[in-house]
Image: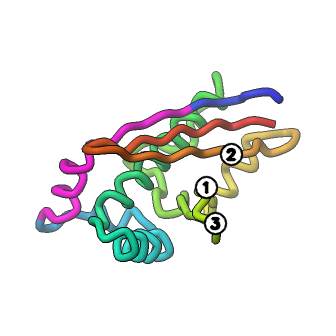
């Protein structure tokens, strides 16, 4: 197995929760409807805050972007942080609770066109403990 890119990100959950509730914030708009629904349901089941689950999804999005940028090597980045379509990178759990990265729209199209051979497999691991949410993404063949 060849690794094309590795990305890691950590998020301070309390600071993230504060950003979610700031007047005029657009943080919630950076998540898909499915991500918001899944985070709310997970918070209800676990009896904790929705911010915990959104923070770890956010760490996953950032880790994916970092892994993708590393995999591009010397190629120009297709997006900047300001125009990256964050909602099109969904961090969703399957029926067993295993997280996956789902790409849609422009991100999926650009990601596929970046590779002449097979499209890399996206592996993701999410975790949160105490005040920190963390994610690691590996792109491999």
The image shows a total of numbered marks equal to 3
Q: From mark 3 to mark 1, how far is it between C-alphas?
A: 15 Å
Outermost residue toward the front in this view: 46
- Disc nearest the viewer among 3 and 1: 3
Residue 8 belongs to the span the image colors magenta: yes
Residue drawn 26% across the image and 49% down it: 13
Q: Is residue 33 left or right of residue 137?
A: left
Label 2: how many residues lie within 10 Å, few (<14), some (14-19) or many (20+)? Answer: some
Q: Position of residue 52 (x, y in %)?
A: 32, 57
- Disc nearest the viewer among 3 and 2: 3
* Residue that numbered label 2 is attached to: 122
Q: Position of residue 27 (x, y in %)?
A: 29, 61
Please tell me in which quadrant of the rendered image residue 102 appears: bottom right
Disc number at residue 96?
Answer: 3
Please tell me in which quadrant of the rendered image residue 92 appears: bottom right
Q: Position of residue 96 (x, y in %)?
A: 63, 66
Outermost residue toward the right in this view: 117
Residue drawn 21% across the image and 57% down it: 17
Label 3: how many residues lie within 10 Å, few (<14), some (14-19) or many (20+)? Answer: few
Q: Are marks 2 and 1 in contact (CB under 8 Å)?
A: yes
Q: Is residue 2 left or right of residue 62?
A: right
Residue 121 belongs to the span the image colors magenta: no
75 or 138: nearer the eye? 138
Q: Which residues are magenta?
A: 7-22
* Residue that numbered label 1 is attached to: 101
Q: Is residue 103 above or below residue 45?
A: above
Q: Secondary structure at mark 3?
A: loop
């Amino acid at each position: 197995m060849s690794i094309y890119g590795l990305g890691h990100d950590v998020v301070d959950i309390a600071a993230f929760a504060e950003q979610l509730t700031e007047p005029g914030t657009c943080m919630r708009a950076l998540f898909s409807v499915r991500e918001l629904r899944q985070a709310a349901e997970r918070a209800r089941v676990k009896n904790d805050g929705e911010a915990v689950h959104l923070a770890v999804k956010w760490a996953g999005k950032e880790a994916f972007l970092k892994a993708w940028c590393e995999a591009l090597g010397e190629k120009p980045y297709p997006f900047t942080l300001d125009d990256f379509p964050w909602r099109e990178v969904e961090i969703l759990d399957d029926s067993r609770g295993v997280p996956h990265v789902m790409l849609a729209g422009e991100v999926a199209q650009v990601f596929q066109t970046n590779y002449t051979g097979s499209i890399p497999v996206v592996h993701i691991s999410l975790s949160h403990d105490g005040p920190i949410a963390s994610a690691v993404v590996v792109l491999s063949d």
